[in-house]
Image (cartoon, rainbow, N blue to C red):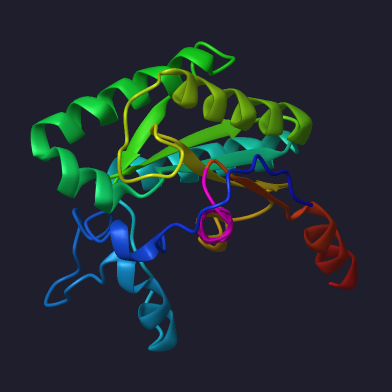
Amino acid sequence: MTDTVTIKVTADPFWTRVRMALGASRPAPQERLPAYGKAAMARSIGMKPRLGARLEEELVMAWMRSAERKVSLSLLVIELDRFKEYSTAYGKLETEDCLMLVRDAIRAVLPREGDSVLRLGQASFVVVLPDFPVLMARATAQKIASAVRDLGLAHKESHAGIVTTGIGLAVGNPRGNYDRKFFETAAEALIKAQRRGLNRIEAVDLRPAQERKRKAV
């Protein structure tokens, strides 16, 4: 199922703009961790892309809590549209100021006091929402998109004229050990959102497939 908010322009692929997101912590001995921008390559040779320590810990804890309580888990992966062009046009300092304003705008619309925004790479943010119904997760994604757009931050390299975000949403019913594919699903939804234009939201509900798989077992 898919929710969209549309301004027609194609954005650059997600993977190539978050190369620094993974492998920043806990490397295995004599192993160089793959950059997130090479996640597809990593999967093709049997390696798994790795998140930063804090983000992975947050995901694992949320997964385990949701599995124990038998509730759903929602995950938002958020990225500035046309970030590379913004960074080139405005420079490092102004880009970082922009990202901090975006982070604060996201945080301001999160519905619960304990919800947090985690940085992923240069241009992306992750919001983990345990025990959060899918309809509320979609509504939160829409609020985030609106809050960032309402900042009115100039983006001369975007046809929107202002800073906007693409958002990927994954919703699942966790069971057992943490499944890294859950994060990949949200990230891939973000890729799809940005390929289809600016200020887009793409949602993937994994629960029906998870339930079919459990019944088959």
Residue 194 among magenta residues: yes
Q: Residue at x 32, y 74 (%)?
A: 38
Question: Is 83 drawn above or below residue 10 in the view shown?
Answer: above
Which residue in the rendered view is the most extreme toward the bottom? 45
Question: Is 78 drawn above or below residue 2 in the view shown?
Answer: above
Q: Nearer the viewer, residue 160 or 30?
A: 160
Q: Residue at x 78, y 60 (%)?
A: 210
Q: Is residue 70 left or right of residue 6?
A: right
Magenta stretch, main secondary structure class: helix
Q: How far from the left and from the top, in percent, is residue 91?
A: 11, 40
Q: Nearer the viewer, residue 60 or 206?
A: 206
Residue 12 among magenta residues: no
Q: How far from the left and from the top, in percent, is residue 49?
A: 36, 67
Q: Is residue 165 left or right of residue 42?
A: right
Q: Which residues are magenta?
A: 189-198
Q: Quadrant of the C terminus?
A: bottom right
Q: Nearer the viewer, residue 59 or 185?
A: 185
